[in-house]
Image (spheres, helix red, strand yellow):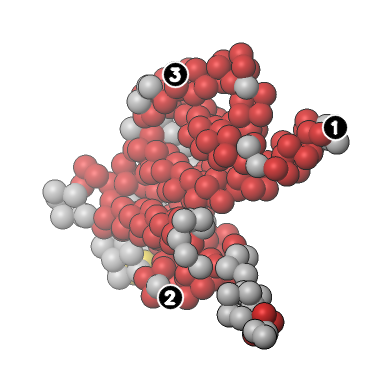
Amino acid sequence: MTDLSQSPTLAPQRSEIEPPIRRVIREFSLSKIAVGALALLVLLVLAAVFAPLIAPQNPYDLAQLDIMDGRLPPGSEAMDGSVYLLGTDTQGRDMLSAILYGLRISLGVGVVSALVASMLGATLGLTAAYAGGRVETVIMRLVDLQLSFPVILVAMMILAVLGKGIGNVILALVIVEWATYARAARGAALVESEKEYIEAARCVNIPRHRILFGHLLPNCTAPLIVIATVQIARAISLEATLSFLGLGVPVTEPSLGMLIANGYQFILSGEHWISVFPGLALLITIVAINLVGDQLRDALNPRKGA
């Protein structure tokens, strides 16, 4: 008689479902580029957070600026004997300090706008998928209408009405970004809504808001996290563009885009460091975020084998 307990086809198999956190760690550990990008991104965030402690100068304090130190090349000495490692701009700001503070503003605007837009868009997307009918039609037509306009044009129109300011820039970015999250959340929620655990929740009369935020949302977070990572880089780039055009943050609190704008007219005259160094900082930040986002997309892809 055959021993069924020894049959390889009936033997218990190891679960192929891998926890998302463990999968992300494993995927990052397999890619040296992703590990380097993540480490670089962490360093940039730490430098931005602790900018007041590590920056040689407070570029927002006019009392610390000396117009006589304006447009000094990298490595020059100041009137007080200190060294400007990356030179100074036209107003005598230390470029290293200005980049650290500008990075703080750029990352802050990108993260806050992406967070608010993701919460708004995810809520509307989940509501559209779960409610259906006219509610879904109205929400998705608003999404289509929003996505049909150029992002930079909408942001410029909003800031032209509201004026400069970090709060107004964040509001403009939220308005132009929420539709992307809403469409992604609706697509993921439509798939999850057909599964048995949602039907079971409906049968036992669980309140709608608990089904949306307690059952649907946790199972739709993977694509939203990936989109949020990419949208942070996009928001930073868009904020830099708006500031470069003079519609973003005020001159008294320059972001990386404003720093680039302050020096672009001197590039051909040999004083390239005023724009080049902030531009490199912006480029490195966006590339690092995009590399981390690409790796997160691969790690959280449900079709990819564990």
Badge 1: residue crowd in 10 Å (few <14, some 14–19, many ≥20) = few
Name the quadrant containing residue 182.
top right
> Cα distance, mark 3 to mark 1?
35 Å
Q: Quadrant of residue 262?
A: top left
Reply above or below: 56 against 244: below
Q: Position of residue 66 (x, y in %)?
A: 41, 54
Mark 1 residue element: loop
Labels 2 and 3: the sequence-earlier one: 2
Mark 2 is on which residue type? Answer: Leu
Amino acid carrying label 3: it is: Leu
Cα separation, mark 1 vs mark 2, equals 45 Å
Q: What is the crowding at mark 2: few (fewer than 14 residues within 10 Å), some, or many (at least 20)?
A: few
| Camera-side residue of 125 and 111 | 125
Identify the residue position indicated by label 3 in the image.
145
Q: Earlier in the sequence, mark 1 or mark 2?
A: 2
Q: Is residue 53 above or below residue 233?
A: below
Q: Which residue is mark 2?
A: 30
Residue highlighted by disc 1: 205
Q: Residue at x 40, y 73 (%)?
A: 31
Q: Residue at x 36, y 29 (%)?
A: 152
Pinpoint residue 110: horizontal percent, then vertical percent.
Answer: 50, 45
**Nearest the camera: 99 or 202?**
202
In this rendering, position of residue 74 left or right of residue 91: left
Residue 120 shows in the view: no
